[in-house]
């Protein structure tokens, strides 16, 4: 994982105070930032304020249960939703299927081995961090593509053929107006121009006395 554990946030939603403390202690030992909630309603508030990377939630809780919490989070936050592990005593195959189909990313039955739980947490966080890295890469790619399109448009603009008067050397702009070439370039390049005389013109228009004789 590219993020150290101290930067990873885990929310525990559990109405059993003893089991809540056990999970909090175990996760804290591994270095994660941990917040707890006593039911699904508190869990919803914590997800908004704490913005966890991963949620471990019981299913059977008062007010709002874990399944409702999972469904609300996955539906509301979509791609930004945290990885969701249902940890519950409901172990029937139909319960597992319902939990996963509702949006849970993983499902564990109580009582479970702490080692297995932490392995599932680490596995879930690997997916979370890879997904975050992928989103950053996609965003960087979009920005690079926008820069490329801008550069391409600039090249096309600079490479267009400019109508120049054969006599006064004025340039005809896209709107049909004729401009001095320094005015034309200054309007497009945001550059200031100073005027001077090249050696050839100096010799032609301002010859020295010796050359004039």
Image (cartoon, rainbow, N blue to C red):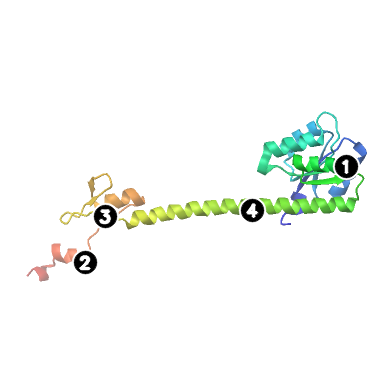
Q: Which residue is pictured at 68% across the width and 36% down the height?
A: 76
Q: Could you tell me how far apart the alpha carbons at marks 1 and 3 are, in whole angstroms?
A: 77 Å
Say left or right for 105 vs 184: right
Q: In the rendered structure, which disc, 1 or 2, sits on the residue that comes first in sequence?
A: 1
> Which quadrant is home to the C terminus?
bottom left
- Using the rendered image of the protein, determine whether residue 206 is visible from the camera's viewpoint: no
Q: Which residue is pictured at 84% across the width and 52% down the height?
A: 118
Of labels 2 and 3, the one closer to you: 3
Q: Is residue 137 above or below residue 35?
A: below
Say left or right for 173 vs 114: left
Q: Could you tell me how far apart the alpha carbons at marks 2 and 3 are, in whole angstroms?
A: 26 Å
Of labels 1 and 2, the one closer to you: 1
Where is mark 4, residue-wise? 134
Q: How many residues crowd around disc 4 within 10 Å: few (fewer than 14), some, or many (20 or more)?
A: few
Where is mark 3, residue-wise? 162
Where is mark 2, residue-wise? 199
Where is mark 1, residue-wise? 92
Q: Pointers 3 and 4 in contact (CB under 8 A)?
A: no
Q: In the rendered structure, which disc, 2 or 3, sits on the residue that comes first in sequence?
A: 3
Q: Which residue is pictured at 50% across the width and 53% down the height?
A: 145
**In what element is the residue under mark 3?**
loop
Q: Which residue is pictured at 58% across the width and 50% down the height?
A: 139
**In what element is the residue under mark 4?**
helix
Q: Could you tell me how far apart the alpha carbons at marks 2 and 4 are, in whole angstroms?
A: 59 Å
Q: How many residues crowd around disc 2 within 10 Å: few (fewer than 14), some, or many (20 or more)?
A: few
Q: In the rendered structure, which disc, 1 or 3, sits on the residue that comes first in sequence?
A: 1
Q: 200 or 147, which is in the foreground?
A: 147
Of labels 2 and 4, the one closer to you: 4
């Amino acid at each position: 994982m590219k993020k150290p554990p101290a930067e990873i946030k885990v929310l525990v939603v559990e109405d059993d105070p003893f089991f809540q403390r056990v999970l909090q202690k175990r996760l804290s030992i591994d270095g994660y930032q941990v917040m707890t909630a006593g039911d699904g309603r508190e869990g919803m508030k914590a997800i908004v304020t704490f913005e966890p990377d991963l949620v471990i939630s019981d299913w059977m809780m008062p007010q709002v249960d874990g399944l409702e919490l999972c469904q609300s989070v996955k539906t509301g936050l979509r791609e930004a939703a945290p990885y969701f592990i249902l940890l519950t005593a409901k172990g029937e195959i139909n319960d597992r299927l319902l939990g996963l189909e509702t949006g849970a990313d993983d499902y564990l039955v109580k009582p479970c081995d702490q080692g297995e739980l932490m392995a599932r947490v680490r596995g879930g966080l690997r997916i979370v961090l890879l997904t975050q890295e992928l989103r950053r890469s996609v965003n960087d790619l979009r920005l690079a593509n926008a820069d490329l399109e801008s550069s391409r448009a600039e090249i096309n603009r600079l490479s267009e053929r400019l109508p120049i008067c054969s006599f006064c050397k004025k340039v005809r702009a896209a709107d049909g107006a004729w401009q001095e070439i320094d005015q034309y370039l200054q309007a497009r390049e945001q550059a200031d121009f100073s005027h001077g005389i090249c050696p050839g013109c100096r010799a032609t228009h301002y010859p020295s006395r010796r050359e004039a004789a």
